[in-house]
Structures are given as C-alpha cells and as structure tokens.
Image (cartoon, rainbow, N blue to C red):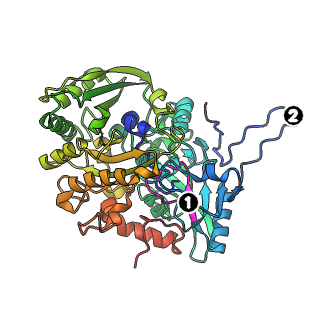
Amino acid sequence: MHREPTNAASPGRRALLTAAGGLAAAAVTATATAATTEPAGAAGHREPVPFGPAVVRPGDPRYASLLKGDNQRFVGHPDEIRVVGTTEQVVRAVQEAVRDGRRIGVRSGGHCFEGFTADPAIRLLLDLSPLDAVGYDPGRRAFEVQPGATLGRVYRTLFRGWGVTVPAGGCPEVGAGGHLVGGGYGPLSRRYGSVVDHLYGVEVVVVDRDGTARAVVATREPDDPDRELWWAHTGGGGGNFGVVTRYWLRSPQADAEARAAAPDPCRLLPPAPAEMLEALVEWSWDSPRTTRRAFTTLLRNFCAWHERNSDPGSPAVGLYAVLRLNHREATTFSMVVQIDAGIPGAADMVKDFVDQVNAGTGLDVDGGSATVPWLYPMTWPGNGEAGDIITRRYKGKAGYLRRSFTDAQLATIHRHLTNDTGNAACGMLLVGYGGRVRAVEPGATAVAQRDVVMKAVYHSVWAGEEDDGANLSWVRALYREVYEDTGGVPVPGRVSDGSYINYPDVDLADPAWNTSGVPWYTLYYKDDYPRLQRVKARWDPRNVFRHALSVTLPE
C-alpha cells in the first residue's frame, strides 16, 4: 500500500491490535544512494555489486515465494517477476515492458487489500523490495526512503541515526512505497499530521507519450515545474502515474532550517518519543452487562470524545486510540491507547480517556498499561504479518467519519457483531484521527478528507478458500447496512466523508454494492479527482500504470 499498488496494512492480528500504536540497524550511506553498498575496508576489498536485476519465471524455485502477497485471495501468474535494486533497473524493466506490450504490476511490501498486482493481465511484476535504502541525503537536505524499505526499517534508521520519525503506520512489515503515496497515517498522526504532510519530493519512473521510460524528480518547491507530479503522490494512491523509486521527507516547518549553510538533520523531521505509554483495555462479550445499550453507549462515547478533542490545537492530539470491535465469537472486544510518555500528565490523560469511553455503560473494564521504549511497539515483528499463518485471506472496507455514527448505525453495528453468521475473526475498528491532520487545507495535498476525526475499518480474516463466501458476505452486509441511507457506501456528508485509498475496495466501483449514484473516485478523492486526471494525462498518457481503481485518463 511503491505499493501493489496500495500498500495498506492488512487487517490481521498485528494490524488490528497494533493499529493503535501501531495499529538490526539499517545501513546508512552519506549520500543515501539507490544501491545499499558497504564502504571498502582493507586494501584490495571490493564493494559489493548493486543488487539485481533478478529475473524469475515460472518453474524457477523462487517463483511461488515471490508471487504471493499478504492477501492470498489473489495470486497472479505473470510471465516474469523482475526483482530490481536500482532506479536504472526499473527504467530498463519498464522500457522493455512497454516495447513488448506487456502489462506491468508493481509491488514493494505486498500488503494490498485487493488483487491489483494479481490481475491476470499483468505479465511483468516488478518487485521493489531490494530498493530499501533509508538515510539522509545532504544534496536534497532531506531524508531519503526507498519504496522497498519496510516501515520498521524506516523507524529504526531514523531513530537510531537522528532521533526523528514520521507519523506513518504501525505495522513494521508494510512497505513504505504504497503506504506513503496513499497518504499513510499512524499513532503520531493526530500530533504530526499525515505522513505525506512531510513529503518533500519523489523520484518516479514515468513513460512519455512516445513510449520512452525515464526517471523524474518532483518536489514541493513552488517553482518546481513538475510540482504537480509531487502533489499527486501526496495521497493520490499507487499504481497511477509511474513507479516511485525514492521519497524524500522533510517537514515543511523545517524548510528554513534546510536553507541554512549547514542544516541539522535532527531538526528536519519530528522528534521521536523516547517512550510510549500503552494501555490495553478489554471488555467481555459474555458478561450479562454487555447489552446492546451498554455496547452502543461505549461506541458513542468513543466517537464523542474524538468529536470534542480533534481540533489541531487540542491538548489531547497526542493521544491515539483504536477501538477493536471483535465479533462476539471472539468473546472479548478491546481498545488500545498510545501516547508519548514524555507528554506532561500523559498517564492521567489516558485514564481520563478510558473513563470517558466507559462512562454510563455499567461494564467492567479489564486490562493494564505499560511504558515501553519507542522502537518496541513500532518495530515488534510477528503478530499477523506475512508468514504468521500458511494461508491468509481477507477483505477490508473503510470509511472516514466527520462525527459519531447515528443511533441507527450503532444499532446496526451491534446486530452484525452479535449475529450467527460472523466468526471470531470478523469485526471492525474505530481509529482515532484528526488533530494536526485537520490543520492542512484539502488542496495542499491529494488527501482530500481533512475535516475528519476517525476512520472506520470493516474486516474479516480467514485461512481457507472454502470460507471465502461466508466471510465476504458478512463484511459486505455489515458495510452496506451501516451506510444504508446513502446507497451502501460512505458518501461525503454530515457523518461520513468517503473512504481511504490505501484501504482499496473494488466493491465501491460495483453498482451492485454502490447504489448511491456517487462514483468510486469521488468517495476516495472528492473534488481532487479532475486534478489527478490532469496529472495522469501529463505523466502517463499511454495509461501504462493502471488497475481496478486507478486514476483514469480524462475523456
């Protein structure tokens, strides 16, 4: 979620639990070059040759391992998987594919909700995972992150080298590529904004009208003639305009520092917390007190708190919480809360928040809290990433919230979470958002939904193909009924504000599931879509980069 083309964190155990917070040190070169080489040592020692390209075709023992992404509902069969390690290799691969008329798919981390890189029409799958350098680029006076770098690698390198961070997601194995271009968010976004609010520039391999592939650098500098290409990558989604081979990150408020004769890299991105205070709160479905009224009161309290405490200047913007609403078959539902432990009164703020969420419910609260070093919650592996189970299939759907769900929507959520068709892996998340995200005007980036306070994620995760039908039916029915009054989808309005492109959902483009009359692209991009189409026409006039929810060329 570059991505495949949407590198969004999958809603597995890791993504569900650590969406709240979330949920070996990287080698850093002085110039942050595309190839991750080590400096020469003793006399006569040669630097390693840059990686790749590796060409993997059917019959190669590597093929199956490189083919499957995190969501194994979708597995393609391309003629070739090209594993690349430099921008130049990407240019050559794209040029050859265009020359031969082969459809291209691009993957960095492989965490897309949908099968965009498993489309049967894709003949060349570009694997960007070796493009994983993270470091400080003194020439750009910004931090370089390549698309194959996982978020865990990004956090470790930025923190160990300079004590800084970015407000990105909480799943450490997600590739930075698609996560960034889709407008990623995470545990520090209420405090520091969307990750793309700190995006200074991109390097993108594009294809000109005459079929020539080349690399272009676009920045947010006002006088950059290619600035619109940068803008499109601040939330426009992956797989639309080209192949991102580098990102440069620098906070806008650090531009003055960057213009200094000798800028201090430690001042160019937000400082990372030294420690995080984490609280896990749990409620029992089996308690006789967990009535519909108690449950919906709790949800309403969570939403109301975010309505009151999500202005950019709110003292509570440092607090981030996710309400994990498991189906009753899981026997419990829970909430994870995170806050920088260094914020004065952090523990009292968390306690007050939990008290307000539980107020008037009559429910018993279980759980506890701990203070942990910053890197622990942000880079802890395991918990639901690829490899946690042999087969992993899921369906995710999403919606932005400008305010609390209505009473009718809350009752619908309770009914589906307690019905006989769901299972322990079905559920939804309510994710705290807003804060400094709301300080940025919608047109400043391609993230159109700025006046929002929460995200809702609806999901089901399962193991076997034989369970596809039941799980898909459950999550689709929940989503359609929550948004029944607006044609089964979160049409922008008083309560909802569309959906999040890093959680792509092809149902939004299907008139069987979207009866609102509002096109899918309006749900994701609102009024920004025509502008994105103009960028598409300028930089991908041959429509080389496309998928089921890609930006289309203007008619």
Which structural element holds mark 1? Answer: loop
Q: Tell me how far mark 2 sits from mark 1, CA to CA.
A: 47 Å
Residue 306 image position (x, y, % from top left): 22, 39
- Position of 177 with respect to 363 (left or right) is right
**Is 389 a magenta residue?**
no
Name the one closer to the observer, 484 or 497: 484
Residue type at the position of mark 1: Gly
- Tag on residue 43? 2
Residue 285 image position (x, y, % from top left): 23, 31
Q: Residue at x 23, y 29 (%)?
A: 286
Secondary structure mostly taken by the magenta-highlighted segment of the chain: loop
**Is 114 a magenta residue?**
yes
Disc 1 crowd rating (10 Å Cα; few below 14, some 14-19, many 20+) is some
- Position of 146 with respect to 523 (left or right) is right
- Tag on residue 76? 1
**Residue range of the region highlighted in magenta in the rendering:** 104-117
Q: Name the residue at the bottom extreme.
A: 555
Up-down: is 281 above or below 168?
A: above
Which structural element holds mark 2? Answer: loop
**Does residue 494 show up?**
yes
Q: Quadrant of residue 444?
A: bottom left
- Position of 273 with respect to 104 (left or right) is left
Up-down: is 306 above or below 72?
A: above
Q: Residue at x 19, y 58 (%)?
A: 484
Q: Residue at x 48, y 62 (%)?
A: 229
Residue type at the position of mark 2: Ala
Q: Residue at x 29, y 26 (%)?
A: 281
Compare marks 2 and 1 and give the one earlier in the sequence: 2
